[in-house]
Amino acid sequence: QVQLIESGGGLVQAGGSLRLSCAASGRTGNIYRMGWFRQAPGKEREFVAHINWSGDSTYYADSVKGRFTISVDNAKNTAYLQMNSLKPEDTAVYYCAGRSSISLTYPYWGQGAFVTVSS
């Protein structure tokens, strides 16, 4: 099993920045890809970005492209989501997730981090 613990959420004004962290523990050798998802109030969960655990092959949702950066630090078993130029519509609970190379879905999930962007 893989455990994911998130940190770094909070309240920020529009135009500001936050960095979310996702620390992985347990069978981290099973992780092939890390993703970030978010769920705004009253909306379905949506994809934000993903990165291979090796650090290559990033992909972003159009809504965050150019503003958010996903990265991993294998030495720390931690994935990050740097969020710049935040907008009120970025307000959501952000979840990190991990999957293996043979899984098409994400079986490992963090507990969620609240991000609130005020206008």
Image (spheres, grey):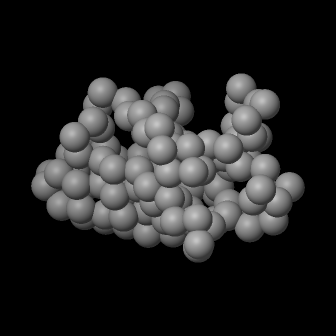
Residue at the far right in the pictured view? 1
The residue depicted at 44 percent of the width and 55 percent of the height is 71
How far from the left and from the top, in percent, is residue 74? Answer: 58, 65
Q: On screen, 61 above or below 52?
A: above
Judge whether residue 84 can be spotted in this image.
yes
Residue at the far bottom in the pictured view? 76
The residue depicted at 81 percent of the width and 65 percent of the height is 26
Please tell me in which quadrant of the rendered image residue 35 appears: top right
Count of marks placed on residues:
0
The residue depicted at 58 percent of the width and 73 percent of the height is 76
Asked whether 15 or 59 is in front, the reply is: 59
How far from the left and from the top, in percent, is residue 78? Answer: 57, 65
How far from the left and from the top, in percent, is residue 49? Answer: 44, 39
Q: Is residue 45 left or right of residue 30?
A: left
Q: On screen, 73 above or below 109?
A: below
Q: Is residue 109 left or right of residue 38?
A: right
Name the quarter where the N terminus is drawn.
bottom right
The residue depicted at 78 percent of the width and 50 percent of the height is 30
Asked whether 99 or 111 is in front, the reply is: 99
How far from the left and from the top, in percent, is residue 16? Answer: 18, 61
Asked whether 18 or 89 is in front, the reply is: 18
